[in-house]
Image (cartoon, rainbow, N blue to C red):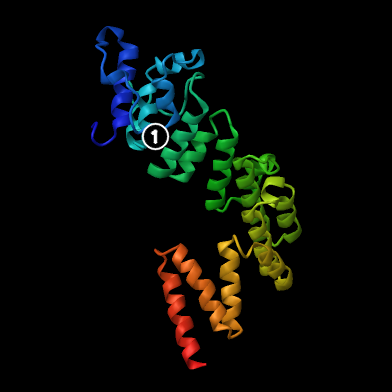
Amino acid sequence: MAALNPSLYHGLRKAIILHHPYLKTGGSAEQLPVENVHPIFGVLFSEKIPKEHIGFMTSNEIYPALALAAGWYEAALNLHGWTPNKPASYSSLSSESPRWVAYGYAKALVANRSNEEALAFIDKQSHSPQLSLLVGELNIKLGQYPEAEKALRPFAKNTSPIGVKSALLLSQIYSSKGQLTLAKQVLLDNSELANSIAGKEALARLELNYGDPEEAERLYSALSEKSVEAKSFFAKKAFQAGDYKTAYKLTKVLAEQFPERADLKAQLNQITKAAKKS
């Protein structure tokens, strides 16, 4: 097991020692693993575990939590709450569980069960911004836009990464319903997003999709040096105008930036063929 996941291997050893101090023999079980893949391992291997984490670290919940942190989703789902006389249950978490644990189980359910089961699980937990964002994302995937909007709206003006993502998703919901004004406003109301490349690209897409190509071009023009999307826009515009030299130049820059993208190589060939025919 150590060869496959050193952090999980050493984390389990350290957890066992916390539960059974008489097994302590020193050595590698006390050393921080080289690949510290999740903050829980940093807490577990700290010189002194913070007081607020002692209860959780010395409970049986630490074992499935370590599996979650290492990405062993099925193991975590089958371990939580399990005893020889009781089947596993992840529906109720202890009050000592860090917030990331509920999010981890929700992601495990998305990956190994279904979006619906994940939403049912989240509904029983104390909500956090991270969980609310996930609720929004899952409801969008299920086409349940009112539920997604309800989950995302409270965070859409927050300038944290969660707030920025919430605003982007909320804007997409309004756009899908043809509500251009609301779609634009939710982007502009988040100051972090409004001043970012992603936010300006989203505004440009809205203008393009709702019939104002001049405003879209103005927005893309301001991003032309930094935005992949803007370069793609101007490469396509140049190609359609027969300016194959500019189209090739911009597309080549993108192809060099993303050598794994076969579509860009195909576009370069298309531009070359069109140039020869002109």
Q: Position of residue 266 (x, y in %)?
A: 42, 76
Task: In this rendered view, identify the residue nearer to me: 76 or 208.
Answer: 208
**Quarter location, residue 68:** top left
Q: Position of residue 223 (x, y in %)?
A: 64, 62
Residue 16: x %, y % from top left: 30, 17
Q: Nearer the viewer, residue 176 or 217?
A: 217
Q: Is 122 displayed left or right of 219 in the figure?
A: left
Look at the numbered disc 1 and give the secondary structure of its residue: loop
Residue toward you, 137 or 28: 28
Residue 85 shows in the view? no
Name the quadrant of the N terminus: top left
Residue 56 to residue 197: above or below? above
Q: Residue at x 73, y 72 (%)?
A: 214
Q: Nearer the viewer, residue 33 or 55?
A: 33
**198 with respect to 92 (left or right):** right
Identify the residue shown where x is 60% and y is 66%.
230
Residue at the disc numbered 1: 37
Q: What residue occupies the far top of the structure in this picture?
A: 22
